[in-house]
Image (cartoon, rainbow, N blue to C red):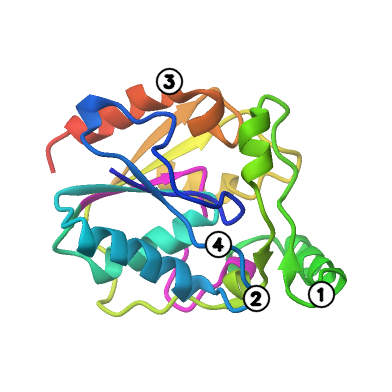
Amino acid sequence: MVVEEDASANGRRRPSFGHSDLHRSWRAGAPSSPSNDLETHIQDILAVIKYEDLRDIVLVGHSYGGIVATGVADRARDRITRLVYLDAFVPTDGQSLMDAGPPMARQRMKELAKAGDGWRVPSNPIPPDTSDADVKRRLPQSIKCFEQPLKMHGGELSLPRSYIYLTRVAPSDPFRPFAERAKSDRNWRYYELDASHSAHITAPAALTQVLQTIASQPT
Protein backbone atom coordinates (compact mmCIF):
# COMPACT_ATOMS: atom_id res chain seq x y z
CA MET A 1 0.00 0.00 0.00
CA VAL A 2 1.41 3.38 -1.03
CA VAL A 3 -0.07 6.51 0.50
CA GLU A 4 0.19 10.08 -0.78
CA GLU A 5 -0.99 12.48 1.91
CA ASP A 6 -2.01 16.09 1.67
CA ALA A 7 0.65 18.58 0.59
CA SER A 8 1.62 19.79 4.07
CA ALA A 9 2.38 16.34 5.53
CA ASN A 10 6.09 16.24 4.80
CA GLY A 11 8.65 13.52 5.32
CA ARG A 12 8.45 9.75 5.13
CA ARG A 13 7.37 7.26 7.73
CA ARG A 14 5.11 4.28 7.89
CA PRO A 15 1.54 5.53 8.19
CA SER A 16 -0.05 5.05 11.58
CA PHE A 17 -2.60 2.69 10.01
CA GLY A 18 0.13 0.42 8.63
CA HIS A 19 -0.76 -3.23 9.36
CA SER A 20 0.85 -6.53 8.47
CA ASP A 21 -2.27 -7.68 6.63
CA LEU A 22 -1.85 -4.74 4.27
CA HIS A 23 1.75 -5.69 3.40
CA ARG A 24 4.24 -2.83 3.32
CA SER A 25 2.81 0.63 3.70
CA TRP A 26 4.65 3.72 2.53
CA ARG A 27 3.92 7.37 2.78
CA ALA A 28 5.74 9.55 0.29
CA GLY A 29 6.42 13.27 0.42
CA ALA A 30 8.90 15.80 -0.92
CA PRO A 31 10.48 18.51 1.30
CA SER A 32 9.07 22.00 0.98
CA SER A 33 10.73 24.08 -1.76
CA PRO A 34 9.71 26.98 -4.04
CA SER A 35 10.45 24.79 -7.06
CA ASN A 36 8.11 21.97 -6.02
CA ASP A 37 5.05 21.39 -8.15
CA LEU A 38 2.56 18.62 -8.82
CA GLU A 39 5.06 16.82 -11.02
CA THR A 40 7.59 16.80 -8.14
CA HIS A 41 5.18 14.80 -5.99
CA ILE A 42 4.18 12.44 -8.80
CA GLN A 43 7.82 11.67 -9.52
CA ASP A 44 8.50 11.18 -5.81
CA ILE A 45 6.02 8.32 -5.58
CA LEU A 46 7.00 6.85 -8.93
CA ALA A 47 10.56 6.65 -7.59
CA VAL A 48 9.38 4.79 -4.46
CA ILE A 49 7.52 2.31 -6.67
CA LYS A 50 10.49 1.82 -8.99
CA TYR A 51 13.32 1.51 -6.49
CA GLU A 52 11.35 -0.58 -4.00
CA ASP A 53 10.08 -2.68 -6.93
CA LEU A 54 6.52 -2.46 -5.61
CA ARG A 55 3.77 -4.31 -7.46
CA ASP A 56 0.07 -5.08 -6.96
CA ILE A 57 -0.22 -1.72 -5.22
CA VAL A 58 -3.24 -0.29 -3.48
CA LEU A 59 -2.57 3.41 -4.01
CA VAL A 60 -4.22 5.78 -1.55
CA GLY A 61 -4.47 9.52 -2.19
CA HIS A 62 -5.50 11.75 0.71
CA SER A 63 -6.72 15.34 0.20
CA TYR A 64 -4.41 17.03 -2.36
CA GLY A 65 -2.79 13.60 -2.65
CA GLY A 66 -5.78 12.49 -4.72
CA ILE A 67 -4.45 14.57 -7.59
CA VAL A 68 -0.96 13.14 -7.15
CA ALA A 69 -2.29 9.58 -6.92
CA THR A 70 -4.25 10.04 -10.14
CA GLY A 71 -1.08 11.07 -11.96
CA VAL A 72 0.87 8.15 -10.49
CA ALA A 73 -1.85 5.64 -11.40
CA ASP A 74 -1.82 6.97 -14.95
CA ARG A 75 1.92 6.33 -15.35
CA ALA A 76 2.24 3.10 -13.38
CA ARG A 77 -0.80 1.22 -14.64
CA ASP A 78 1.02 -2.11 -14.65
CA ARG A 79 1.93 -1.78 -10.96
CA ILE A 80 -1.29 -0.50 -9.40
CA THR A 81 -4.33 -2.70 -8.83
CA ARG A 82 -6.59 -0.29 -6.93
CA LEU A 83 -6.88 3.43 -6.43
CA VAL A 84 -8.41 4.79 -3.23
CA TYR A 85 -9.35 8.43 -2.68
CA LEU A 86 -9.40 9.25 1.02
CA ASP A 87 -11.37 12.49 1.48
CA ALA A 88 -9.55 13.65 -1.64
CA PHE A 89 -9.80 15.68 -4.79
CA VAL A 90 -10.57 13.61 -7.90
CA PRO A 91 -9.25 15.58 -10.88
CA THR A 92 -9.89 15.23 -14.57
CA ASP A 93 -7.21 15.60 -17.22
CA GLY A 94 -5.99 19.21 -17.32
CA GLN A 95 -7.26 20.17 -13.86
CA SER A 96 -5.17 21.58 -11.06
CA LEU A 97 -6.18 21.64 -7.41
CA MET A 98 -7.20 25.26 -7.89
CA ASP A 99 -9.48 24.16 -10.74
CA ALA A 100 -10.94 21.24 -8.80
CA GLY A 101 -11.50 23.13 -5.54
CA PRO A 102 -13.93 25.94 -4.72
CA PRO A 103 -13.14 29.40 -6.17
CA MET A 104 -12.90 30.91 -2.68
CA ALA A 105 -10.05 28.52 -1.83
CA ARG A 106 -8.20 29.50 -5.00
CA GLN A 107 -8.23 33.16 -4.08
CA ARG A 108 -7.20 32.40 -0.51
CA MET A 109 -4.18 30.37 -1.67
CA LYS A 110 -3.01 33.17 -3.93
CA GLU A 111 -3.27 35.69 -1.11
CA LEU A 112 -1.40 33.38 1.29
CA ALA A 113 1.38 32.84 -1.27
CA LYS A 114 1.81 36.58 -1.72
CA ALA A 115 2.29 36.91 2.01
CA GLY A 116 4.67 33.93 2.11
CA ASP A 117 7.65 35.11 0.06
CA GLY A 118 5.58 34.84 -3.09
CA TRP A 119 5.39 31.02 -3.00
CA ARG A 120 4.65 29.57 0.43
CA VAL A 121 1.13 28.32 1.14
CA PRO A 122 0.84 27.37 4.83
CA SER A 123 -0.88 24.27 6.08
CA ASN A 124 -4.65 24.40 6.36
CA PRO A 125 -6.15 24.33 9.86
CA ILE A 126 -6.20 20.75 11.10
CA PRO A 127 -8.66 18.87 13.31
CA PRO A 128 -8.14 19.41 17.05
CA ASP A 129 -7.66 15.67 17.63
CA THR A 130 -4.42 15.64 15.59
CA SER A 131 -1.35 14.67 17.65
CA ASP A 132 1.32 17.24 18.50
CA ALA A 133 3.94 15.18 16.64
CA ASP A 134 1.97 15.36 13.41
CA VAL A 135 1.20 19.04 13.86
CA LYS A 136 4.93 19.77 14.05
CA ARG A 137 5.59 17.85 10.83
CA ARG A 138 3.32 20.04 8.74
CA LEU A 139 5.14 22.56 6.56
CA PRO A 140 4.13 25.10 3.92
CA GLN A 141 4.19 24.06 0.27
CA SER A 142 4.82 25.85 -2.98
CA ILE A 143 1.80 27.33 -4.68
CA LYS A 144 3.03 25.62 -7.85
CA CYS A 145 1.77 22.32 -6.40
CA PHE A 146 -1.76 23.67 -6.55
CA GLU A 147 -1.47 25.64 -9.80
CA GLN A 148 0.02 22.97 -12.07
CA PRO A 149 -2.60 21.05 -14.08
CA LEU A 150 -2.60 17.27 -14.11
CA LYS A 151 -1.53 15.88 -17.48
CA MET A 152 -2.74 12.36 -18.14
CA HIS A 153 -0.47 10.30 -20.40
CA GLY A 154 -2.59 7.22 -21.03
CA GLY A 155 -6.17 8.41 -21.14
CA GLU A 156 -8.93 7.72 -18.64
CA LEU A 157 -8.21 5.31 -15.81
CA SER A 158 -10.02 1.97 -15.82
CA LEU A 159 -8.70 0.32 -12.65
CA PRO A 160 -10.99 -0.25 -9.64
CA ARG A 161 -11.52 2.97 -7.68
CA SER A 162 -12.95 3.63 -4.24
CA TYR A 163 -13.85 6.80 -2.37
CA ILE A 164 -13.76 7.11 1.43
CA TYR A 165 -15.65 10.16 2.64
CA LEU A 166 -14.84 11.37 6.15
CA THR A 167 -18.05 12.71 7.63
CA ARG A 168 -16.74 14.98 10.40
CA VAL A 169 -16.49 17.73 7.84
CA ALA A 170 -14.90 21.15 7.96
CA PRO A 171 -17.21 24.12 7.30
CA SER A 172 -16.01 24.49 3.70
CA ASP A 173 -16.08 20.71 2.95
CA PRO A 174 -14.47 20.78 -0.52
CA PHE A 175 -14.69 16.98 -0.82
CA ARG A 176 -18.45 16.51 -0.74
CA PRO A 177 -18.89 16.96 -4.53
CA PHE A 178 -16.36 14.22 -5.23
CA ALA A 179 -17.93 11.93 -2.63
CA GLU A 180 -21.41 12.42 -4.06
CA ARG A 181 -20.16 11.78 -7.58
CA ALA A 182 -18.49 8.53 -6.51
CA LYS A 183 -21.53 7.44 -4.49
CA SER A 184 -23.79 7.79 -7.52
CA ASP A 185 -21.43 6.06 -9.98
CA ARG A 186 -21.78 2.27 -10.12
CA ASN A 187 -18.20 1.98 -11.34
CA TRP A 188 -16.95 3.24 -7.97
CA ARG A 189 -17.05 1.72 -4.49
CA TYR A 190 -18.12 4.25 -1.88
CA TYR A 191 -17.52 4.26 1.87
CA GLU A 192 -18.10 6.66 4.74
CA LEU A 193 -16.16 6.88 7.97
CA ASP A 194 -17.05 8.83 11.09
CA ALA A 195 -13.74 10.67 11.36
CA SER A 196 -12.15 14.04 10.75
CA HIS A 197 -10.10 14.84 7.66
CA SER A 198 -6.84 13.22 8.86
CA ALA A 199 -8.34 9.82 9.67
CA HIS A 200 -5.04 8.03 9.05
CA ILE A 201 -3.78 9.89 12.14
CA THR A 202 -6.90 10.31 14.27
CA ALA A 203 -8.81 7.08 13.49
CA PRO A 204 -6.20 4.59 12.22
CA ALA A 205 -7.96 1.43 13.41
CA ALA A 206 -11.27 2.27 11.76
CA LEU A 207 -9.52 3.34 8.57
CA THR A 208 -7.48 0.14 8.51
CA GLN A 209 -10.70 -1.88 8.53
CA VAL A 210 -12.07 0.01 5.54
CA LEU A 211 -8.80 -0.34 3.63
CA GLN A 212 -8.67 -4.05 4.40
CA THR A 213 -12.18 -4.40 3.01
CA ILE A 214 -11.20 -2.58 -0.17
CA ALA A 215 -7.95 -4.52 -0.59
CA SER A 216 -9.66 -7.89 -0.16
CA GLN A 217 -12.29 -7.36 -2.85
CA PRO A 218 -11.88 -9.07 -6.24
CA THR A 219 -10.65 -6.84 -9.06
Element at label 4: loop
Q: CA distance from mark 2 to mark 4?
A: 10 Å
**In which quadrant will I find the C terminus?**
top left
Dot placed on the residue nearer the N-terminal end, 1 or 3: 1
- Please, what is the three-letter code of the amino acid marked with disc 1? Asp
Mark 1 lies on residue: 117
Q: Residue at x 39, y 65 (%)?
A: 44
Q: Is-magenta flag for residue 85? A: yes
Residue closer to the observer: 97 or 1: 1
Q: CA distance from mark 2 to mark 3?
A: 36 Å
State which region is magenta. 81-98
Dot placed on the residue nearer the N-terminal end, 2 or 3: 2
Query: Is label 2 or label 3 in front?
Result: 2
Mark 4 lies on residue: 31
Query: From the viewer's perspective, is residue 123 above or below residue 18?
Result: below
Mark 2 lies on residue: 34
| Location of residue 58 in the rendering, given as x and y in whole percent from the top left corner | 26, 45
Q: CA distance from mark 1 to mark 3?
A: 40 Å
- Please, what is the three-letter code of the amino acid marked with disc 3? Ala
